[in-house]
Image: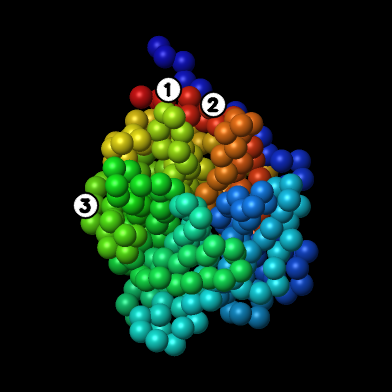
Amino acid sequence: MKKLTDATQILKRHPANPLIKPSDYPGVMQTYNPSPVMYNGETIILLSMLFYKQERLGETRVARSKDGIHFEVEDKPFINLDINEFPYNYVNRHIIDNRVTQIDDTYYILTPVMAGKFDGPATVLGKTKDFKKYEVMDVITLPRNRGASLFPRKINGKYYKLDRPGGGNASEGLIWLSSSPDLLHWGSFRPVLSPFAEYGKSKMGPTPPIWTERGWLVIIHAVLEPCDGPHYSIGAVLLDLEQPWNVIGRTYSPLLTPEMDYETRGWVDNVVFPCGAIADYEKDELRMYYGAADTRICLATGSLREVVDACIQNV
Ligand code: BMA
């Protein structure tokens, strides 16, 4: 029998975890689900934050770090969708769980936003070049679609994104793919992945794909529901470089599953949740920033090559 890598052995939690926690910021209730990206040699995280005074409405702030460990969190929201005109008057609530993707010199941000009486979340596309000014572009998915994620480069002349239709009370969360000539108009929808037994039986969601020579590496969250409620784990899927609807591998065990106190206990117990990861090709390192128990920000790192190996071995 083929020997499979146990993917839970690849990433190591950082000893300084949690890197960001609410008790460091007065009035802050939750700091979680980070979307990381490199900008001018610094690590930037789009941070999901909830405040005691805001009655459970979240906002997104920029956190910056020179070493990827010590972060400074800005004191004002970065993404502001408080736009009093159609359609944003329907979609301006609870700005969390962004996915950021650099394409050339622009950083595109997909934000799953609530859409009030028209259901939700739908996905707003915005962009920035400097993480100071945010510019909204359009609403690019129907509800329900939480976690839509852009690929960092075109494939055969087209932009691609992963979608996460379903979820909420409606149905399971699945992963689909769509393509576009201009980032605004999307079509050619293709199914990619449906829930799987080992650690993603209930639902799952994507993050922005990472290019590797052997395929697009997609870090996912995946949910199992044992009797003590949902457990959110982090896994990896590998997609064909030219035909990204083809799954060419997947880790059969999670990369991370809630184990440490800071992951098993918090506002929502038993959650490790990524909105992206950083690939350092020179160091052969995957830097996985993740939300722990919807309360704090943590980091786990390991070999990018080993993560891809683990995906490929499971076919
Ligand atoms: C998902 C999202 C995430 C959250 C997770 C666990 O549905 O709401 O923001 O981290 O649930 O609570």
Q: Secondary structure at mark 3?
A: strand
Q: In the structure shown, which secondary structural element does the residue marked by tag 1 occupy?
A: helix
Above or below, 113 relative to 262:
below
x, y percent for residue 52: 66, 76
Pointer 3: what residue? 188
Give the image quarter of residue 258: top right
Please tell me which residue is depicted at 28% across the width and 37% down the height of the picture.
243
Which residue is drawn at the image coordinates 49% and 58% (left, top)?
Answer: 106
| Mark 1 lies on residue | 313
Viewer-proximal residue among 294 and 287 = 287
Mark number, residue 306: 2
Answer with left or right where residue 74 lies relative to residue 196. Answer: right
Does residue 14 appear anywhere in the picture?
A: yes
Measuring 43% from the left and 57% from the top, which residue is drawn there? 147
Q: In the rendered view, does 200 fall on the left or right side of 13? A: left
First-in-chain label (1 vs 3) = 3
Q: Quadrant of the N terminus?
A: top left
Residue, far top: 1
Q: Earlier in the sequence, mark 2 or mark 1?
A: 2
Q: Determine the CA span between mark 1 and mark 3.
A: 30 Å
Q: Nearer the viewer, mark 1 or mark 3?
A: 3
> Which of labels 2 and 1 is toward the front?
2
**Picture coordinates of residue 81, whole percent (x, y):** 49, 77
Question: Against 269, is 26 above or below?
Answer: below
